[in-house]
Structures are given as C-alpha cells and as structure tokens.
Amino acid sequence: MAKVELMDYDRAIEMFEPVLGFEVHIELNTKTKMFSDAPNFFGGEPNTNITPVDLGLPGSLPVVNEQAIKYSISLGLALGCSIAPSSRFARKNYFYPDLAKNYQISQFDEPIAFDGNVEVELDDGRVFQISIERAHMEEDAGKLTHVGGSTGRIQGAEYSLVDYNRAGVPLVEIVTNIIYGAEKDAPELAKAYVSTIRDIVRSLDISDARMERGNLRCDANISLTPRGSGKLGTRTETKNVNSLRSVERAIRYEIQRQAAILATGGTITQETRHWHEDTGTTSAGRPKSDADDYRYFPEPDLLPVEPSLELIEELRAALPESPLLMRRRLKVDWGFSDIDFQSVVNAGLLVELVDTVSEGASPQSARKWWMGEISRTANEQGVDASSLVNAHQVAALVKLIDAGILTDRLARQVLEGVIAGEGTPAEVVASRGLAVVSDDTALIAAIDTALASQPDVLEKIRDGKLQAAGAVIGAVMKAMKGQADAARVRELVLERAGSAG
C-alpha cells in the first residue's frame, strides 16, 4: 500500500478550517432487545441470543421495547432535546451479511428527540456548545468476524463468520449539527464530546457505555474548508471508533491527510473510512451513501410512538446532574487541585472515580489507583483503563489496604491477579497468600534474625541514629517476602532497641 502523505498539523490548520460532525451510537442496557424478547447482554455463545424476529424470518413481527422508549426519552432530555409528541419507525434498506432482514428498523424523518444542545468542556476550561440535530431509536446489526489475514478485517481474510447475538440490540443514535469553530482544538473537542456523551449515558444508567465492547461507538465526520472560501468541503466518515484516544487521533490524522491532498490540487472522496489503532491511520471503506440510497419508508408493522406529557415530565424530573455541573461540584467536594482533577477528566476516568468513591473508597485513594497502576497497565496493553477492572473491584482493593491487610506493594500484586481474571481482590489475596503478616511473634523472630547479622545496629539506634533501623527493616521485609507492614516493623525494631523514637 502506497504511503499516505500527511501535512504538518499546524500548517493544515493555517490553510484550512476543520468542520466536524459526530454520530454516536449508544447500546441501551435493557433486559431484552428492541423488537423481540431475546436476551440483551454482552457475550454468550454465537447465535444463541436470537429469536425469529431478530433474523427477520417469515411471519415474525416486531414489538417495541417499552423500557427502551423510556431510556431514549431520558437521553433526549439530558441532551436538551425536545421530545416529539409522535415519532415513527422506518425501514432503512441495505444489504449486508450481518443484517439478516436486509433492512434495519430505525427512525428517519420523525425521530423521538430533536433540537438539543450539549456543553463540552476542554482541558483549559473553555466550554463549547455542541448543537444536537436529533437522537433517534434503532436496532443494532450483528457482528462479522473475519478469519485469516493479518488485520482482522475483510481485506485479505479467508472467510467471515456472522454472529447475530447483537442483532436487534436497542440503540440510540445521537447526531450533531455541523460544528464550526473548533480550529486547532478539533481533535480535543472530538474526544471531549464523546467523553461527555459517555458520562451522560452512564449517569442515566441506561448503558454500560464501554467502548471496547461496542456499547458506545463514534462515527466521526470531518471536512476541510479552505480559508476564506466560504464553501463546505467534502466530508469523510471514520466509522466505529472505539476509544476516546482513538477519536482524538482519528480526527487529527484525517485533518493532516485531507490537507495534504487538497494542498496539491487533489479532491476528497466522500466515503467511510476505517480506523486502524495499530498504525494510527485510516483507510478507505465504501462510498458514503446519502439518505435516498436507503429507500426509507414507514415501518408497516409498528405504530407511532406517542409518549404522554406526564411520562415525559416524570422522566425529566428524574434526570441526574449534568456532567459539567457535576465536575465543578466534585472538584470542590473532593478537594482536588485543578491539575489533579483535570488529569482525571483528561484520562476519561471521572465516572470510574465517582463509582469507586460511591463504593466507599476515598477520592484520593480512588484517584491514586485509577490514575496510577491501572492506567499504567492499560497503556501497556493499549486498552482503556475501565476495560481492566471495575469500580467495585478497586474499592474492594482500597478497603483491604485501609484495613491493613495489604500494603501498596502487595496491593499491586493483587490488582495484577484481578486483571488476570483470578477473582475478586479478597479471592486473589487468599489464593496467592498475599495478606500482610500481622503476627508480631513472626515479625519479632525475623527482626531478631536480622539484628543478629547486624549487631552494631542496636547501638547506633540507642545513640540516636534512628536511620540505622532502615537496614534491619529492609532485611525483614525481604525475609517476609514483602508481606510485612514496614511501619510496624520499624516500631518493633525501635522497641527492641529500647528507644522511644
């Protein structure tokens, strides 16, 4: 494949104005699917969570999931949208192997929510207003697995397998209006917007919003307008970007790629693009279809959705605090510095900290572990930190530390076991035998052994040279394989020396 030329990012922004647009797909965590009673959960053996409705078999008829309607209204309200008094489902017709019916039940010209606005805060505190065109309900497609080849994509694969477990899972697609004015902050704004949407749906508890599982997916649209031209450029749509970091990188890459083409007199093809995490690049997908190509028509098997005003107001009253207001409140409540709090937001781990604190951990401990060992491991593995452990597990780890059962050193080993799937923190402690030795008798025996090999240490301590205890403490910790509390060992050493220090 020929090498793609890229323009320097700063130079690209000097020559062109980036114009953005986002389509974020949210899988709802209802118990059953959008139009059938098939179970809705992640995982399971392929092609087991399906019914005739999901496969579009003859004679099967869809029935709307009431809870999915309520979740969709709540999301629309949280996005500042108006809720349509009547909305209708439509058939979006296209052929692809993961769409057994050859059409998708979606909403076209009558979405359930429209005309919204979301406030998005950047790292430096500036707030962007993102205008929402619509939020509409639809069903998800199945999933293809391409076998053979080196990339896991259809190009070069020997064959493909289709799993319809995801077919029919309830989705809400949030579509922005055209976004102007991002300028050089376009990549950061893209990441911040998707992060804000993720925070909103998690606070509503309507989706797990785990990007690595596809619960939340972003299609990122980008075009470049030559400075002073007043004309919109041709857009590309990078499909199904599945991490916050990747959203930011994909926008930056497309700006540099498109700028290089336009600067040499080339033209941009209106198409979908695939994001490649390993190389940090995009590649051409298919020519981007317009709405007319899908031959939308009203779904004949479903009645319009007409929520009552009472239901809408009931759901409005139950809305949680907005992410922006929550961040400002939490920063004060937790006593974090601007830098410490912003680092959590930038890492996309605010929800994880909130959930960990709600499980009983202190804000400081929650931040220490999520931003420290967990993030380090996630960076090494190239995944989101939230995919490794959950808030309940981290809070349980912190409780073991606070109870004196674990030191930080032992806790890191326990965390390693939890990430490896060995069980809860308590189970890993038991199976690996990692608890702190709290028996003073065992500690004193180890201290006496260490002192016997260093007979001058006691005299040094008695002479006021307390730092001499460090050699004994180190020897004891080594003998106890790190399972002693260093502070308790120091206390016992000083007691043996007859010192009150």
Image: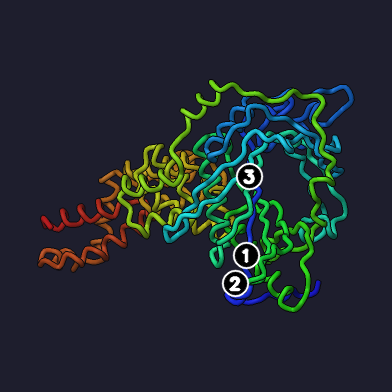
Q: Residue furthest right?
A: 58
Looking at the rendered structure, the secondary structure element under dot 2 is helix
Query: Residue 470, located in which quarter of the rendered image?
Result: bottom left
Decide: few, some or many residues near mark 2? Use Cα within 10 Å; few <14, some 14-19, many ≥20: many
Considering every residue shown, the one lying at the far bottom of the view is 264
Could you tell me residue 316's position as x and y percent? Answer: 50, 29
Its colouring scheme is rainbow
Amino acid type for the residue under numbered disc 3:
Glu
* Circle nearer the N terminus (2, 1): 2
- Residue 133's label in the rendered image is 3
Which quadrant is home to the N terminus?
Answer: bottom right
**Which disc number belongs to residue 13?**
2
Local packing at callout 1 (Cα closer than 10 Å; few below 14, some 14-19, many 20+) is many
Tell me what residue is drawn at x 87 percent, y 27 percent: 57
Q: Residue at x 61, y 63 (%)?
A: 249
Residue highlighted by disc 1:
18
Identify the residue at horizontal 74%, vertical 58% (top origin).
274
Image height of 60 relative to 230, above or below: above
Q: Give the residue type that dot 2 points to.
A: Ile
Circles 2 and 1: CB distance less than 8 Å?
yes
Q: Which of marks 2 and 3 precedes in the sequence? A: 2
Q: Quadrant of residue 459?
A: bottom left
Is 497 situated left or right of 258 in this image? left
Q: Position of residue 264 (x, y in %)?
A: 74, 79
Please state which amino acid type lies under the numbered disc 1: Pro
In the rendered image, the vertical position of residue 343 relative to residue 399, given as above or below: below
Query: x, y percentage for residue 60?
Result: 84, 23
Residue occupying the point 85% across, 41% down: 295
